[in-house]
């Protein structure tokens, strides 16, 4: 019996999962290491919290949270979810970018132009040429 593995795409084979296993001489207490993408999500979430704290309305809500919850638990939750979630097989940040782009843009487009909704009046400019068909008889 031979154990063969069918590889349909080499993208998965050559995708390197970058992880941090130790910092200087200190071994991280996380089995399997910390994904580098998770560290980036943590840093971006922490920066977003710091920016949102400066806003008038949102800052009051975020300021009501305790400091460990605000600066550690919330960014860590975002980092864990972002590193582990892969909707549609894509990274979380690319999925979020595409989803937001889908919600923001105009709903109906064709060839890069907006398509009018049903029942919406459309102004047509230009000349439309018509010609009578001599071969066909019109029923009376």
Image: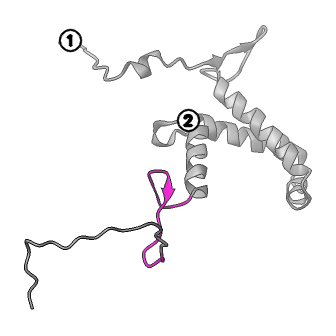
Query: Which quadrant of the view contains residue 84?
Result: top right
Side of 62 relative to 127 (left or right): right
- How many C-alpha atoms fall within 10 Å of the one at disc 1: few (<14), some, or many (≥20)? few
Q: Is residue 72 visible?
A: no
Image coords of residue 51 (percent x, y): 86, 45
Residue 2 tag number: 1
Observer-nearest of 6 and 67 = 6
Observer-nearest of 111 and 134 = 134
Whole-number angstrom distance, CA of label 2 to CA of label 1: 34 Å
Which of labels 2 and 1 is toward the front?
2
Residue 44 tag number: none
- Look at the image and say whether residue 116 sits in the magenta stretch: yes
Residue numbers of the magenta segment: 106-121
**Label 1 element class:** loop
Q: Is residue 118 visible?
A: yes
| Residue at 56% from the left image edge and 20% from the top image edge | 17
| Residue at 11% from the left image edge and 73% from the top image edge | 134
């Amino acid at each position: 019996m031979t154990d063969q593995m069918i590889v349909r795409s080499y993208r998965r084979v050559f995708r390197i999962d970058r992880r941090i296993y130790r910092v200087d001489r200190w071994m991280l207490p996380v089995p399997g290491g910390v994904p580098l993408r998770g560290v980036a999500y943590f840093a971006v979430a922490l920066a977003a919290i710091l920016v949102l704290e400066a806003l008038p309305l949102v800052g009051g809500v975020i300021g009501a949270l305790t400091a460990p919850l605000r600066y550690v638990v919330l960014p860590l939750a975002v980092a864990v979810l972002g590193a582990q979630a892969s909707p549609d097989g894509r990274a979380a940040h690319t999925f979020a970018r595409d989803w937001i782009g889908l919600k923001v843009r105009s709903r109906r487009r064709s060839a890069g132009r907006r398509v009018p909704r049903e029942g919406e009046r459309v102004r047509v400019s230009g000349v439309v040429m018509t010609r009578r068909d001599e071969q066909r008889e019109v029923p009376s």
